[in-house]
Amino acid sequence: MVRKRLLRRAAILSVGALVLALASFAAPDAKAADVAAESEPVKSFKSFTYTNDEFSLDPYLGKVPIVLDFGSIYCSSCVQSIPHMIVLQEKYGKELKVVGVNLDTSGLSRVKKFFSAFAATLNFPILLDKTLAIANQFKVLQLPTYIIIDKSGKIVSTIIGYDEENRAKMDAVIDKVVKGEAITAQEKVLGQEVTIQSPTNFTMTYQSYIWVIGKANGNKGPFTVKLNGGSPRTAKINKDSFSVRIPLCYGSNFIEVDYPKGEGKGTQAVVLFRDPRMGEGLGANFPEYKFHLPAREKNCVDCHEMEPNAEEAQSGMSTSCQLCHGYQTEEKFVHGPIPVGGCPACHDFKSKPHRYSLTAEGSDLCFTCHGDVKSKFEKSAVHGPVAMGLCVVCHNPHSAPYKFQLRASQSSLCLGCHEDMRAKANKMHIHKPITQDNCTGCHEPHASESQNYFGKADGAKLCELCHSSQKMATHSHQKSGAPSVKVPGIPLDSKGLLSCKSCHDPHSTDETRLLTFKGGCDGCHAAVK
């Protein structure tokens, strides 16, 4: 019953809908090796439970065996293991201490709500590792991870992943540790049937896509990858490796790799955070994930050329990059340098330790070629991304399906930040530029001398870009100056004067002619009477 209830609850908490809930992790030591059994005594730690109670390992460390269960409410196998942890704690009672360590360090209200639903059933503490200090201490690199500590306070076994096979092996190890029996060398590290090599767990990226690459360690697959509990993608297998390129969401991305294991399946998982670059970001305290480092490249050199040949290096042009990064040129509009191997125009082929770093940052890099447009951005009102030098928020530096290498259509790009405008799209009557995906018909996307939403002009002059002044002159209705009659609720400009927007909404309304007043002309004039 406990298992069913927990699984049902996990299903309700849709990972896709709660993608930002894992928004802030601290980074583990970037030099941390694969998790392995340690011989040094464990250092005690203190933390707080999901019920805000203080917890210390001191009363148990060196006195009874301890199982540290590192997991997340967004990790399906983590959730599936909770009922078994309850059973283990109940079975051994005071002879064993199970301690859950939850790594969902943002959206904590959801985490607390999740565990509070089972407060009567949970018989072990659930700690909130807000800064990943505990995860760092034990070098946790994949989820779920179980650290088993013996009565002397030393780590004797590390188990990665939860499935039927690992559960049976974990039970055997715990039983031996409780009884004071020695475990075998094979039992010191369990569950590393496959290895996720890219991306590194608890890191951050600005990229919209990432390659998930792993070592199969003899497993023939198939390997499927799920992002935040979504639909699985099948990875391509090449010799003893597997890989698949997946899109990323803003915020936390929980990446699960499933593979065959015995008669069932095994799972490995990592967390990668995508920062939007804008403003102060979302506050993730992750190190940036970088692939082209010597330690990572050595896993690839048997099959891939990781640097241009001597001739390309001499000429300053390279097509070698296309062998792995050919997808960068698949869209309709491709950045000029790329098709001719001009990668060194933006990437430094001699940078160390991270190779192929950008030769400059942000718009400074773009202006090395596009210096002719720099003066256009030096106006009194500058669009946020431009002011921050973040051209790539809207433009893909490699290729894109839209002109000017826009990442999406104009309206999609604008609504990506200006979400309050989405409701406008559901009105009965929509202004023509919007239906034509032409936000830039009225708004300058980069900079403007107008302080009014980067308009291409102010007031009636903006409207006259499409609605000629001659036609506007025949308009018999008062359209400027102080209103001759005060009408409650009618929009006026900052000086209290009439403008085109007093009667017409520039985006959309439920009234004909984009009228702002409910009931249109009749509604307004009825209010005057």
Image: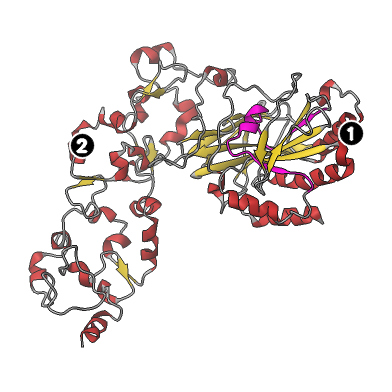
Q: Nearer the viewer, residue 467 or 453?
A: 453
Real-space Cα distance between discs 1 and 2?
70 Å
**Residue at x 27% of width, y 71% of height:** 514
**Residue 494 picture location, percent across and down:** 19, 62
Q: Name which residue type carries label 1.
A: Asp
In the rendered image, residue 482 lying in the magenta stretch gets the answer no
Residue sitting at the far bottom: 529
Query: Which region shows up in magenta?
Result: 123-150
Return the residue at label 2.
Answer: 373
Task: Specify the quadrant that holds the C terminus.
Answer: bottom left
Query: What is the quadrant of residue 527 in the picture?
Result: bottom left
Percent across and percent down for residue 301 are: 56, 18
Give the image's coloring scheme.
Answer: secondary structure
Q: Quadrant of the N terminus?
A: bottom right
**Residue 241 visible in rendering:** no
Q: Tell me: 143 left or right of 368.
A: right
Q: Which residue carries the number 1 mark? A: 175
Picture residue at 73% right of the left edge, 27% below the top: 218
Rendered location of residue 174, percent (x, y) = 85, 33
Image quadrant in which you'd find residue 49: top right
Q: Secondary structure at mark 2?
A: helix
Is 67 situated above or below 456?
A: above
Residue 74 in the image: x percent, y percent?
Answer: 64, 46
Look at the image and say whether residue 128 sits in the magenta stretch. yes
For badge 2, the amino acid type reads: Val
Secondary element at image label 1: helix
The disc placed on residue 432 is: none
Whether label 1 touches label 2, CB < 8 Å:
no
Question: Where on the picture, by quarter, is residue 187?
Answer: top right
Residue 458, placed above or below residue 135: below
Identify the residue at image location x=87%, y=36%: 95
